[in-house]
Amino acid sequence: MTMPETQTEMAEPLIQVRDLKMHFPVTDGILVQRTVAHVKAVDGISFDIMPGETLGLVGESGCGKSTTGRCILQLEKPTDGQILFHGDDLGSMGRADLVAMRRKIQVIFQDPFSSLNPRMKIGDIIGEPLAVHGIESNSADRNKRVAELLTVCGLSPKMADRYPHEMSGGQRQRVGIARALSMKPEFIICDEAVSALDVSIQAQVINLLEDLREEFDLTYLFIAHDLSVVRHLCHRVAVMYLGKIVELAPCDELFDNPTHPYTRALLDAVPVPDPTIEAGREHRLVKGEIPSPINPPSGCVFHPRCPIALDKCAGPVPELRELRPGHFVACPEVS
Amino acid sequence: MTRLLEIEDLRVQFFTSEGIVRAVDGITYHVDAGETVAIVGESGSGKSVSALSILRLVPDPPGKIMGGKVKFNGEDLLQIDDIAIRRVRGRDIGMVFQEPMTSLNPVLSIGRQLTETLEQHLSSNKVEAHARAIELLGLVGISEPERRLKQYPHHLSGGMRQRVMIAMSLACNPKLIIADEPTTALDVTIQAQILELMKDLTRHMGVALIIITHNLGVVARYADRVNVMYAGRIVESGVAEDIYHRPRHPYTRGLLRSVPRLDQPRGERLEPIFGQPPDMTQLDDGCAFRPRCPFAVGRCEHERPDLEAVGPGHESACWQRDELDKGVAA
Ligand SMILES: Nc1ncnc2c1ncn2[C@@H]1O[C@H](COP(=O)(O)OP(=O)(O)O)[C@@H](O)[C@H]1O
Ligand SMILES: Nc1ncnc2c1ncn2[C@@H]1O[C@H](COP(=O)(O)OP(=O)(O)O)[C@@H](O)[C@H]1O
Ligand code: SF4
Ligand SMILES: [Mg+2]
Ligand SMILES: [Mg+2]
């Protein structure tokens, strides 16, 4: 795969995902559980993420974005494929190495409230991983570090004494970010990290994530269903549909020249906040709904909804091919 | 145009352990026959409560409609008796909510829910109601309507359920539909299908639509006129072009500069509104936006601005409304 727009003399990717598959068994039976089918949540995807890069992973609910993130975090054991971090396969690493590596990979979720312990003070929520991993075992040092992290995330150090329910959604999301940063990670998976926030607060957190990436040389996998946010933040973007990547390209290239019929349908569906532009836009609606990932359509998984599908689209599965430098698309019918 | 709905100085409060929440704090607006009016604002600004109070659906207690008028075809819905308001609900005014699962009855088939409404409000007989139910499902783009009528809400996808909700809201030929975040829970391609459907049907049938949303793109695509709410009040009101291209309230302007846009190249810095929305139990006599407002002047602290005209059909509730006229298009 090629270089992202911002990196030129890059050495090796920070993250490499190779032919990742995650098939969840669907079981039946009351006494004896037997597997009757599989949910093909992620079905053979590959991508790299360069140091300092933000890779966007977009697509509608159920397409496999979070599962991809959970596999990278080693929260799921993939059915197949590899995840390399600094070139090392996380799946074949010994426990001690994995624990050390996992500290470098952190996650920020959508709903900060459900991921924060309601009975813990904010200071302890942020300080806990520091204590558990023996990074700051002295409590005075730990408090100092917590105060620093709160400040970096735009919160007052006094917030350390508060409880999650005493904070707004935006403040809780900043706490989630501070907690992730406490481990001095290299790589952060943001899974719908700004999706639940109101516009004015969302903009604050987006700017914070951008600033932190620059200040601490972070690399992000930015999982989101909001395409406008993704365009704003990402260097490259991968579009998923039913467990597969259908298009992958540098950010502005993807949004200016969407090529896969699904990407086009997706972008068409997003309204822009300008009534004059909207009045002049043609809206081609994609028909139908997303099929079940248990029995995905044969061939190109998008073919039943695709406006340009031909008979042969139900045949062999189209591979990603490089249409222009760095612009990959899994549809043989477009150019 | 005929005034279909006229809301005057509507005030709704909640009496909670934390204090009195002035959820809707004196709002005035109207909806003409057949037009689409959007209510936009951040969560907690009073959008849903203002809509629920039109049909007197605010839970009481803890909520209470404290005053104002809701005139529908000239009649004040806050004054009519309980039987009359029940007739208005579901017949003259339809509602579509964010989560159709909570407004559909889980133990009744889709068909029964539709025919029940028809039998109750239009005194249709069973045969008429069944035929009309099939027609309605066809209208909202549900294929195989005969089969669907026998299904239960949990058999349907979120998008399908919302289509059924729309069919129900349209069942009795209403004059007005109130849609509260109708597509917020849906994926973007399904959102587009549902919104196009609502637009086509309301235009076709001449039904007016109040659409409540926090999505500025949806408003730009679908609304004729826009009311921007902040802390229980309408702070700006006007046609969509004025609101987006010539905003005359600092909050509207801030919102437009905060929102990332699909049509803007990556990396453009967003200009967030700093701070957070106010605690609705602690509102004072000044402008509620003051702590976050880059335009605030001394007066904003103790005098609350009311909506005043800044142009034809364009109103702003801001002491600095004329300052904002000076070359600050968003
Ligand atoms: N633990 C699990 N067991 C079974 N199915 C799962 C599990 N986790 C996710 N899935 C299914 O995998 C698919 C992809 O889910 P997910 O990765 O959460 O999608 P996204 O984040 O894109 O919305 C969905 O159909 C979901 O229901
Ligand atoms: N049942 C209730 N009890 C107490 N407060 C409520 C209740 N419903 C709404 N509120 C309060 O009223 C205000 C307006 O709420 P709402 O109209 O739901 O906002 P929006 O729809 O704009 O997000 C909020 O401050 C909310 O907390
Ligand atoms: S009245 Fe004052 S504080 Fe309120 S929005 Fe206008 S300038 Fe800002
Ligand atoms: Mg997800
Ligand atoms: Mg609401």
Image: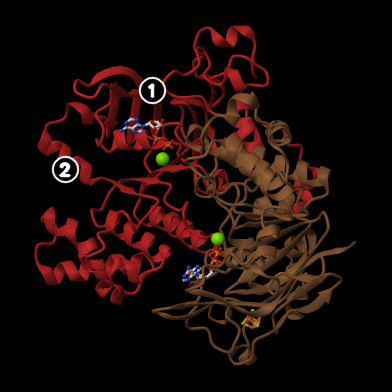
Chain colours: A red, B brown
**Do residues under tags 1 and 2 come within 8 Å of each other at their CB atoms?**
no
Up-down: is B277 above or below A249?
below
Q: Residues within 10 Å of mark 2 (few under 14, many from 20)?
A: few
Alpha-carbon distance for marks 1 and 2? 30 Å
User: Residue B258, located in which quarter of the rendered image?
Assistant: bottom right
Point out the image quarter for the C terminus of chain B: bottom right
Image mark for residue A100: 2
Q: Residues within 10 Å of mark 1 (few under 14, many from 20)?
A: many
Point out the image quarter for the N terminus of chain B: bottom right
Q: Residue A28's spot in the image, x, y percent?
A: 29, 21
Viewer-side label of 1, 2: 1
Up-down: is A209 above or below A279?
below
Image mark for residue A99: none
What's the chain of the residue with tag 2?
Answer: A
Q: Secondary structure at mark 2?
A: helix
**Does the numbered disc 1 mark a residue whose Cβ is under 8 Å from ligand 1?**
no
Foreground of the two, B44 or B298: B44
Q: Earlier in the sequence, mark 1 or mark 2?
A: 1
Q: Residue A316's spot in the image, x, y percent?
A: 50, 8
Q: Is residue B185 left or right of residue B212?
A: left
Q: Amino acid at mark 2?
A: Ala
Q: Going 36% across and 69% down the picture, which residue do you hit?
A: A167
Q: Secondary structure at mark 1?
A: strand
Foreground of the two, B269 or B235: B235
Number of numbered discs overlaid on the protein picture: 2
Q: Which residue is mark 1?
A: A40
Foreground of the two, B310 or B223: B223
Can you see residue B233?
yes
Q: Amino acid at mark 1?
A: Lys
Can you see residue B326?
no
Up-down: is B219 above or below A120?
above
